[in-house]
């Protein structure tokens, strides 16, 4: 019992930068108090003293604002930060080293007794503030659930779930094959933006990216992406920074991909217009301030 208490205090001291001392954690952290009271209530529940277990958990709810059913199973070194408004259902299971923030609900969507109604969090899961995980499925090890996400389906290990309803963002090593196939399919489309076209006319030749006027914006989007951690001298990868609200990398964000496609397409059109203006000047037509003497119909015929 005391070994578990020392582990709980140590994990809070490690994960919460606001924790200054162990005595402060022991006396002023309601998440720790809720875990300690739940262990007593769960012990009573397992021995068949159901009313005593429920009453003990009810006292813990009054003292901490955290509602944990005495039938729920909670592992070691679980950190409930702030904790107010956290609700954990009867058949919920929480693995070791999980972190749960305020306003989280581990609830169910079915009302049948005797079945698994609440989620299972495997080890190392981080659940952001206000997230709702509803159903008897599993959230894989070291997965992250973003703030205010509503998760109603399983989350693979190491993935990030964000949004309402939540969409799952897979880690790079799992998403790379799928994205590669998608890129190959995209390149095979003749009408896809950014795809090389046939050399039927000078205006349809590929334009190098170095000539694109939109390159600064493209570089800005690149800088907005998180770079992978650099390996140390012994080849080991440094431990990833603690992300309290489950914010993952955006390498596979579809919005970023669409923005890149739009930028590429716009840059190609600008380059084609510049080459067309140069061709018109070579033909003896003077162009000033973006105006030219050719009407739209003749200009379209020349482009074709």
Image: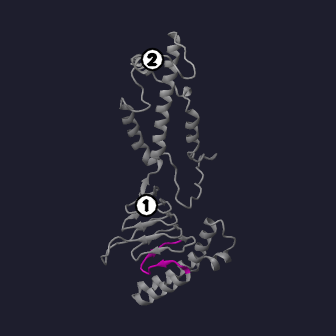
The residue mark sitting in front, 1 or 2, is: 2
Q: Are the residues flagged by discs 1 and 2 in contact, CB closer than 8 Å?
A: no
Give the CA distance from mark 1 to mark 2. Answer: 53 Å
Residue position marked by numbered label 1 in the rendering: 140
Q: Is residue 36 magenta?
A: no
Viewer can see residue 28: yes
Image location of residue 137, percent across then percent down: 37, 65
Which residue is painted at 42% across and 58% down in the image?
A: 166
Say which quadrant the C terminus sits in. top left
Viewer-side residue, 5 vs 138: 138
In the image, is residue 75 above or below residue 190?
A: below
Viewer can see residue 77: no
Q: Which residues are magenta?
A: 64-76
In the image, is residue 133 above or below residue 223?
A: below
Say which quadrant the N terminus sits in. bottom right
Prevailing secondary structure class for the magenta stretch in the rendered image:
loop
Which residue is painted at 44% across and 51% down in the image?
A: 170
Q: Residue furthest right?
A: 20
Mark nearer the N terminus (1 vs 2): 1
| Mark 1: few/some/many CA within 10 Å (<14, 14-19, 20+) | some
Image location of residue 268, percent across then percent down: 48, 28
Residue position marked by numbered label 2 in the rendering: 202
In the image, is residue 185 above or below residue 252?
A: above
Q: Secondary structure at mark 2?
A: helix
Q: How is the image coloured?
A: one colour
Image-quadrant location for residue 297: top left
């Amino acid at each position: 019992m005391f070994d578990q208490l020392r582990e709980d205090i140590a994990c809070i001291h490690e994960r919460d930068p606001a924790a200054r001392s162990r005595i402060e954690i022991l006396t002023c952290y309601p998440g720790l108090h809720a875990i300690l009271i739940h262990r007593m209530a769960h012990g009573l529940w397992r021995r068949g003293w159901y009313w005593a277990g429920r009453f003990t958990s009810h006292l813990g709810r009054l003292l901490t604002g955290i509602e944990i059913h005495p039938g729920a199973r909670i592992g070691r070194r679980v950190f409930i930060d702030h904790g107010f408004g956290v609700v954990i259902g009867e058949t919920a299971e929480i693995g070791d080293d999980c972190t749960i923030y305020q306003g989280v609900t581990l609830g169910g969507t079915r009302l049948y007794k005797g079945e698994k109604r609440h989620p299972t969090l495997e080890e190392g899961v981080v659940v952001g503030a206000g997230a709702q995980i509803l159903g008897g499925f599993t959230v894989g090890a070291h997965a992250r659930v973003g703030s205010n996400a509503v998760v109603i389906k399983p989350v693979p290990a190491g993935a990030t779930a964000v949004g309402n309803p939540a969409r799952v963002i897979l880690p790079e090593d799992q998403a790379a094959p799928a994205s590669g196939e998608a890129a190959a399919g995209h390149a095979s489309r003749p009408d896809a933006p950014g795809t090389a076209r046939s050399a039927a006319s000078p205006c349809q030749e590929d334009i190098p990216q170095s000539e694109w006027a939109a390159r600064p914006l493209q570089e800005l989007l690149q800088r907005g992406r998180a770079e992978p951690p650099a390996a140390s001298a012994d080849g080991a990868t440094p431990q990833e920074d603690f992300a309290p609200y489950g914010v993952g990398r955006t390498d596979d964000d579809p919005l970023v991909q669409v923005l890149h496609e739009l930028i590429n397409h716009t840059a190609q059109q600008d380059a084609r217009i510049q080459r067309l203006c140069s061709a018109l000047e070579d033909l003896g037509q003077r162009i000033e301030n973006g105006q030219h003497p050719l009407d739209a119909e003749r200009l379209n015929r020349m482009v074709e």
